[in-house]
Image (tube, grey):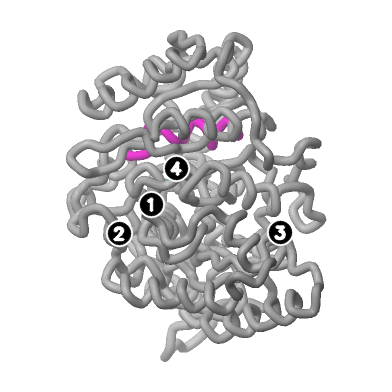
């Protein structure tokens, strides 16, 4: 059982002075300390967090409005620019980078009284599916220390499940919120592309990057999304928030049409299939209509993603040259050597791999064969999702092909690691919203159920997920 309860109940406690913001921050910092050996956290922002807590308690004592998230501690993945600790993206090349401004998402949460208490571990620059690609250390799964928490937001997911804070923030470029949520037994929400500003979040693949919450319930995810969502003048890809907002979820399963994604069940692990099948039966009993849906280009999504993503990564990582942010190589004779040495010493092997693949697929000789073709198939995928959504309200499948694997199991074989993302990447290429909710366990390890909705149907998806979560409890 969680020590926190729902986010809205915590806010009520702080506003009615049953508990202080300071107590909550201290409780959070204590839980982080007690669970240190899971290595979910890179740094705490203790001093600043306690100061902010005092300020919020003072506001409340004076009868001022301290906001919709008054006094609630949260943890941000360390690729969010946030005050109070360095921002490293878990990469050596950013070590010592002290941000001059904060991400819009953090600013919006803070404006409503939430308090960032720590920065969570991730695969460096969010490249990975297990958090083992962190340049600093690997994070352990809360259910089994010998296993990975998933990635790349593995620190955030583990932190939430270990009760270090009531919620955490992650980023999802190809599954990095949903996959760790599934592996750790949390709720992970990936909004429609553009619904939450990416300003102040270290870019991975700009055309698929989104920001979202990792929480203990769908209700909490909806509240956090509601505070972060909407247009931002600093990110021109942001879209208007939905008129009704994302809280006070209602909705009904009766009469909803759900499409089981055929391609995600072909050759699926039998145990995972059993868990998803059992959930589907419950949905049917609750009145949903379940049909099978096929999207023939889906098996190509992984290959498409691992061309487009490195292409964008190679471009986004070109700004780290040892001159402007964080690490700079010592003992260099001129600027060229400084660029070379800073990059070769500062980047880890996965970042280098992606820079090389990206530069290759964008090069004049191979652009048509790889990058252009991948974009063509991406358009096909967008059309197939549109077609599917002309027949059903939501799509359903597992979040991952297996439960959490052992630490070290896939580290020697990048392709095997990439295969972990087979059920998450298409959603990012298409820009639609998706959520992973806990659906059950296999030998003590959580299994995630993934629900997907059409673009901008975030509210409908959260309502559906809220009902599904209730059914699966
Ligand atoms: N695992 C995927 C990758 O390594 C997705 C990462 C992410 O969503 N940040 O590219």
Q: Residue 191 shows which numbered tag? A: none
Q: Nearer the viewer, residue 83 or 207?
A: 83
| Picture quadrant where residue 137 is located | bottom left
Mark 3, residue position: 68
Q: Earlier in the sequence, mark 4 or mark 3?
A: 3
In this picture, which residue range is highlighted in magenta?
Answer: 420-431
Determine the residue positioned at 32% across, 39% down. 420
Mark 1, residue position: 151
Residue 32 in view here = yes
Q: CA distance from mark 1 to mark 2?
A: 8 Å
Residue 87 at x, y = what percent?
53, 73
Mark 2, residue position: 132
Any magenta on residue 258? no
Q: Kindly tell me whether mark 4's CB lies below 8 Å from ligand 1.
A: no
Mark 3 crowdedness (10 Å alpha carbons): few <14, some 14-19, many ≥20 = many
Q: Secondary structure at mark 4?
A: helix
Q: Kindly tell me whether mark 2's CB lies below 8 Å from ligand 1.
A: no
């Amino acid at each position: 059982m969680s020590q926190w309860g729902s986010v809205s109940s915590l806010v009520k406690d702080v506003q009615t002075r049953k508990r202080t913001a300071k107590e909550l921050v201290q409780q959070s910092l204590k839980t982080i300390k007690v669970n240190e050996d899971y290595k979910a956290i890179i740094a705490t922002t203790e001093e600043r967090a306690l100061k902010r807590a005092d300020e919020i308690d003072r506001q409340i004592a004076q009868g001022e409005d301290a906001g919709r998230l008054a006094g609630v501690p949260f943890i941000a993945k360390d690729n969010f620019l946030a005050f109070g600790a360095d921002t490293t993206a878990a990469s050596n090349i950013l070590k010592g980078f002290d941000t001059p401004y904060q991400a819009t998402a953090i600013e919006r949460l803070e404006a409503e009284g939430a308090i960032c208490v720590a920065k969570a571990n991730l695969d460096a620059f969010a490249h990975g599916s297990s958090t083992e690609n962190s340049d600093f250390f690997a994070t352990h799964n809360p259910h089994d220390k010998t296993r990975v928490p998933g990635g790349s937001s593995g620190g955030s997911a583990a932190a939430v499940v270990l009760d270090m804070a009531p919620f955490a923030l992650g980023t999802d470029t190809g599954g990095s919120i949903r996959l760790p949520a599934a592996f750790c037994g949390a709720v992970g929400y990936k909004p429609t592309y553009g619904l939450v500003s990416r300003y102040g979040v270290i870019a991975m693949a700009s055309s698929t990057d989104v920001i979202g919450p990792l929480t203990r319930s769908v209700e909490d995810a909806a509240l956090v999304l509601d505070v972060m969502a909407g247009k931002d003048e600093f990110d021109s890809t942001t879209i208007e928030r939905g008129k009704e907002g994302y809280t006070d979820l209602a909705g009904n399963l009766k009469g909803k049409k759900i499409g089981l994604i055929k391609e995600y069940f072909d050759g699926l692990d039998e145990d995972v299939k059993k868990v998803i099948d059992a959930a589907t039966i419950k949905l049917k009993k609750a009145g949903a209509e379940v049909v099978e849906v096929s999207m023939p280009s889906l098996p190509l999504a992984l290959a498409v993603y691992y061309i487009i993503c490195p292409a964008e990564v190679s471009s986004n990582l070109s700004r780290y040259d040892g001159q402007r942010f964080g690490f700079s190589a010592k003992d260099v004779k001129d600027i060229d050597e400084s660029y070379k040495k800073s990059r070769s010493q500062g980047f880890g092997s996965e970042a280098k791999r992606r820079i090389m693949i990206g530069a290759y697929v964008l090069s004049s000789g191979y652009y048509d064969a790889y990058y252009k073709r991948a974009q063509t198939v991406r358009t096909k995928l967008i059309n197939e999702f549109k077609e599917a959504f002309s027949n059903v309200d939501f799509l359903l499948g597992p979040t991952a092909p297996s439960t959490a694997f052992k630490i070290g199991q896939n580290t020697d074989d990048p392709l095997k690691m990439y295969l972990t993302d087979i059920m998450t990447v298409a959603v990012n290429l298409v820009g639609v919203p998706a959520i992973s909710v806990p659906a059950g366990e296999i030998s003590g390890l959580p299994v995630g159920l993934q629900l997907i909705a059409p673009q901008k149907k975030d509210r409908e998806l959260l309502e559906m997920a809220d009902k599904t979560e209730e059914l699966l409890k």
